Image: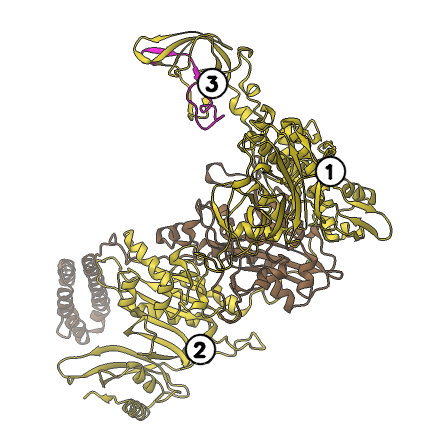
Amino acid sequence: MTDLAQLELDLINAIGAAETAAAVEELRVAALGKQGSISGLLKGMGAMSPEERRERGPMINGLRDRVSAALAARKAELEAAELDARLKAEHVDLTLPSRPRRKGSVHPTMQVMDEMVAIFADMGFAVAEGPDIEDDFHNFTALNFPPKHPAREMHDTFFLTPDPETGERKVLRTHTSPVQVRTMQSQKPPIRIIAPGRTFRKDSDATHTPMFHQVEGLVIDKGVHMGHLKWTLETFVARFFEVDDVDARFRPHHFPFTEPSAEMDIRCDRSGGELKLNEGDGWMEILGCGMVHPNVLRNCGIDPDEYQGFAFGMGVDRLAMLKYGIPDLRPMFEADTRWLAHYGFSAFQAPNPASGLS
Amino acid sequence: MKFTLSWLKEHLDTAAEIDAVAEAMTMAGLEVEEVHDPVAALAPFTVARIVSAGRHPNADRLQVCQVDTVDGMKEIVCGAPNARAGLTTIYAPIGAYVPGLGVTLVEKPVRGVVSHGMLCSAAELQLSSESDGILELDDDLQVGQPAAGVFGAEPVIDFEVTPNRSDWLGVAGIARDLAAAGVGTLKTPAIEPVAGTFPSPVSVRLEAPEMCPVFAGRVIRGVRNGPSPDWLQHRLTAIGLRPINRLVDITNLVSYDRARPLHVYDMAKLVGAEIVVRGGQTSEAAAGIAAGTPEHLIALDGKTYAVDASMCVIADAAGERPIGLGGVMGGESTGCSDETVDVFVESAWFDPIVTAQTGRTLSLNSDAQYRFARGVDPASVVPGLELATRLILDLCGGEASEIVLAGQAPADPAGFAFDPARVAALTGLSLTDDRIAEILAALGFEVRRGAPWTVTPPSWRRDVEGAADLVEEIARIEGYDELPSTPLPDLGAPARGVLNPRQARVRTARRALAAMGYAEAVTWSFTKRSTAALFGGGGDRLALENPIAADLDCMRPSALPNLIEAAARNAARGHPDAALFEIGPIYLDDSPTGQRTVIAGLLAPKSPRHWGGAAEDALFALKGDLMALLDELGAPVASLQLVQGQNRDWWHPGRSARLQLGPKNVMAEFGALHPRVLKALDADGPMLAFEIVLDAVPEPRGKASKARGSASLAPLMPLTRDFAFLVEEGRATGDLLRAVAGADKALIAEVRVFDIYRGPGVPEGMKSVALEVVVQPREATLAEADIEALSTKIVTAAGMVGATLRG
């Protein structure tokens, strides 16, 4: 074995045996540093004869390259092992729970109101609002409730304490119809609005709460008739329940403010707490409607010989219960966080025509 | 209103079964609430006869009977004392559901003897409310005969009478509508007048024609009162009325048959020979009686009622003694009994509003009151009296006087013009003129077909006043199923959406708060008045006159009390960590402009412990949520003033603030709630909250263009410089921040607080506020001198608010 071969073997063995980056560095200095053994050989090449240099040069350079490569490789190897060891020490138990985040929610009644607004917006209905505390005229008289008529009693009205000076007794609106009155008084036909909001009746049992929500609708134009009413509500109900078609029927009824008046029923099976539309042979009333009474139009400054139209009203809370299988009405207003978490909706579930209502 | 199928068939010739009748009623607007079919419930039960009855071997009170039944001879154990050989009674087989017990019979031994069925009492079959033994039936009945037939049980329809249709409060009126709807042929028996054989010894004087414009009556003498015949008793019990005696039962029959209430007075108990109809009176002062004391009536229900001038009183004794409330209830003093011999029968017409109000004021309801309040047919005064006379003569015998008639019935409804084209115009139905006229005629309207038509409503249809009413009649009889379904002209969704800016903001706030982790609640618009007072409300004008409950007697001045109480309820259930919000109304006064929309949030910061240590301070987390929300709503967040120490008194004085654009434009209050208020609401604190008055948040100015303008993205690196200032404890850090940020608005992009320090090195009463100022060069890189100059400006600005650079 030549001296060069012996040197290479020794160096390579030493590099392979080096356990730390520092040991590798030490070897590098010993071989390739200023005083290094290979550096010495390289320096010695200057004193060689051209023949000798031609022979020994490539051997020494080759030795240098291989040793450099071995040093680099060993260094990388050791660094990787060091990193591995450090990372191993950095282990974190990720089965630990993250900090809990509160999950917020949108109330089902409000979600359903948003759904209704979305459906009616698509049919060209604007959204009108009005005060909860109303006067007798807007809540009753304008709507063709004769004074002292028994129909007023059916509304179980809440009254505020009378004004000591005028004796006037304000009421909590029993329906959102006063908004219709205010709209007709302030806006010329054609009118197409819905009126969502809080309504109040002095009634409290398993299926009634003293406060609830209504969405009413009003369409006033020339030539609008009950056929339009029927189509509008059939279309609405199908879109609301997110089905192609709803088996619905219209039944005569009586309201002071509409003539003719109707109630709309849908065919459904509610056994087992879940609403199965278009099944079974039971009918369930879901809303009241009719052609706006000529007296109401007149009371609001609209000529019933020129314009006519229809109105409808429905209970939002009740429709929310029906659609989403909420068994009881009263918890809707109790703000039990467990209930809100269960029946509430994600902030990002805003009803829209692209992703559907719900 | 209830009626039976057989009763209906007295007026309507029809082969329709009960379900078909109910369906036709519903579709004609008579909304059926319930069809009760006792025939179905009685189906398993049949007539049986006890052949022998012997003592039970193991029980003294029980007997073992051999019974001849539809199923052959059966051994049945019976506990009734009246079980005996030869008794005809009702047998229930094994497997039958006994409605009065709510059980289904199974074969099992009773004290060691197996009973193969059951013998039934009236109560067990729900034929009466109580009974003291098994049924004892006529021996002529055959074993195996169905029980339903024995008891005359038949289906009963209960339906809702809408307030406009008083004529539906009589079976005859229901039959008329059903005939018009094609269910059968109307055959209401005609009323035959009874000629009086002597002048009425009782006369009538009307002193209050506005309450009672017409009053007819007659005397029938020599009647024999007592229990009604079976057919009449059955008819009344079937619809839930209690038979009393022949005279009373007859008035009830006419009331339900023709919607014509009547009253019968026992003549022997009348004082004087004159009936006076007048308003209620108050007494003049007399010994022991204060002036203005109202007169009283002891009514047939045994209760005493104080009568006022708005009520209609029937009086005798020359008008002195009240003997009835007109149209509502008769008096006990002149009521009929089994001993009654001579009677005076009243058939009058009382004003609907007066009757309704009397019933309401006295909380006194009767079948008569219900009918008069809704409007009885004024034309039925005399015919109703004739019908009652005929029935009394038939059932009680006696002799009728001539009719005495005082006053005049209200005029019949006037005819009005009607264009049959209105039917198509309002409903979209296309019907021939003949069909339209046919429907109206079937309902009793008089139709004169000219140009235009003249239509006169019948006397019992005072609710019909114009063309729209007639259109409803025609449409409902033709059937709403026939209405077309006609698409509304498509206007498309409005180009700018349908929500106004306020409505859109409510929607944004709802979704934003839900995303921030708050659960939306919807709570009452009411609160307790004393609670309202704690939150700046509770005034007289917002108190409810008739609250649903004592703790919901006032309109709320804030949404916070309801949220606090909700959080307290959740805590009481073991869920104290609540984050709730509500977007809804508050009420400042009772005018249409006194209502505001608030966005209220409540945080009960009871986060569970976490291995990673405490989270961010809850109060500042809430402030962060509030500011982020206002930013989402487009509020001018940068120019908002935060003012401490001026919140209203339901807030913690040291831990709350308000956000305002100026002292008169407060947009929101937030912070910790006052412990005193929480305690008053039984809530464990601390609780944090905010309430934004949405109406006070200015809407961003509408821009002509949707374009955003160009973004100015500086090409140069921002740099930061740190400063520490000594500030007096009482000084708001916000003032220092604003001053520093304002030192050079062009260069200073942001000022951050990264430390607040008190302790060694900082004098007592002072705090050290460490700021990181982010500097954004705009034009060119800053030289050291530029930065020095900026630092000087910052220190100077800080000095203006009393802050000195910490050495």
Q: Is mark 2 on a helix, strand or loop?
A: loop
- Residue matched to label 1: B180
Q: Specify whether A142 is left or right of B681.
A: right
Please report, as a chain letter, where disc 3 is located.
B
- Residue matched to label 2: B636
Identity of the residue drawn at 62% across and 40% down: B262
Dots 2 and 1 on the same chain: yes
Dots 3 and 1 on the same chain: yes
Please, what is the dominant secondary structure of the magenta stretch?
loop
Q: What element carries label 1?
A: helix
Chain in yellow on the image: B
Sequence-wise, the earlier of marks 3 and 2 is: 3
Identity of the residue drawn at 55% across and 26% down: B227
Mark 1 neighbour class, 10 Å CA radius: few under 14, some 14 to 19, many 20 or more = many
Taking the image as drawn, is residue B484 in sight?
no
Front-most of B768 and B321? B321
Q: In this view, does B60 lie above or below B285?
A: above
Identity of the residue drawn at 19% across and 76% down: A46
Front-most of A354 and B471? B471
Q: What residue type is labelled 1?
A: Ala
- Residue matched to label 3: B135
Please report, as a chain letter, where disc 1 is located.
B
Mark 3 neighbour class, 10 Å CA radius: few under 14, some 14 to 19, many 20 or more = many
Sequence-wise, the earlier of marks 3 and 1 is: 3
Q: What stretch is highlighted in magenta?
A: B110-133
Q: What residue type is labelled 2?
A: Pro
Q: Position of residue A219 (x, y in %)?
A: 66, 59
